[in-house]
Image: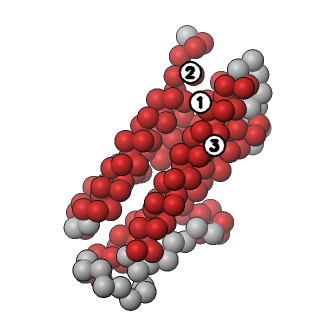
Amino acid sequence: MHPTRNDLPHDVRVAIVKLLNERLADAIDLHLQAKHAHWNVRGPHFFSLHELFDKVAQEVLGYIDEIAERATALGGVAEGTLAAVSSRTTLAAYSLTISDGRDHVDALSKAVAGFGKQVRAAIEKAEQAGDADTADLFTQISRDVDKQLWFVEAHLEAGR
């Protein structure tokens, strides 16, 4: 930990930085999964899905920056390398063989939902640790993730 005048106790900052890096790994993985879907989608709804997946990826980039900056503001290190992300992510691996739009919508909606679940758990962990600011950060992210999930899942309704 880097020295800081932040008044959160050292042990709280250590625990919160660990939590932030866990969610940072998930956010980076989610960003890459959304970009993968964006690059590889095919089918009759290509254009709208291509744009939707890129929009999701852009939103997730914002979460990545906010999470990483919070970790460093607390005196920690934002561990966003490929090695750190691949060893920490809790998201299921994204299939490299799908191309159909509906299959990408299904896969990406599962990834977004999985990230949302982890973020909600992080809200509670941050509150229990005594860091209301990090809990608030995760609450803001959670609210937006739910909106992104709604946008993606809306495309699952079309075939019913």
Q: Quadrant of residue 84?
A: bottom right
Horizontal side of 130 relative to 20 (left or right) equals: left
**Label 2 crowd bin: few (<14), some (14–19), many (20+), radius 10 Å:** some
Q: Residue at x 55, y 10 (%)?
A: 160
> Mark 2 near mark 3, Cβ–Cβ under 8 Å?
no
Horizontal side of 95 relative to 130 (left or right) equals: right
SS assignment at label 2 = helix
Decide which of tag 2 and tag 3 comes sooner along the chain: 3
Q: Amino acid at mark 3?
A: Ala
For residue 49, say whether it is visible. Answer: yes
Horizontal side of 40 relative to 48 (left or right) equals: right
Tell which of 25 and 140 is nearer to you: 140
Which residue is denoted by mark 3 in the rendering? 34
SS assignment at label 3 = helix
Which residue is denoted by mark 1 in the rendering? 106
Gap between marks 1 and 3 measured at Cα: 12 Å
Please identify the quadrant where the N terminus is shown.
bottom left
Q: Residue at x 64, y 46 (%)?
A: 33
Decide which of tag 1 and tag 3 comes sooner along the chain: 3
> Mark 1 near mark 3, Cβ–Cβ under 8 Å?
no
- Residue 127 position, x and y percent, is 24, 60
Q: Tell me: residue 1, above or below residue 56.
A: below
> Mark 2 near mark 1, Cβ–Cβ under 8 Å?
yes
- Residue 146 position, x and y percent, is 42, 37
Which residue is denoted by mark 2 in the rendering? 156
Q: Tell me: residue 61, above or below residue 104.
A: below
**Label 3 crowd bin: few (<14), some (14–19), many (20+), radius 10 Å:** many
Q: Amino acid at mark 2?
A: Leu
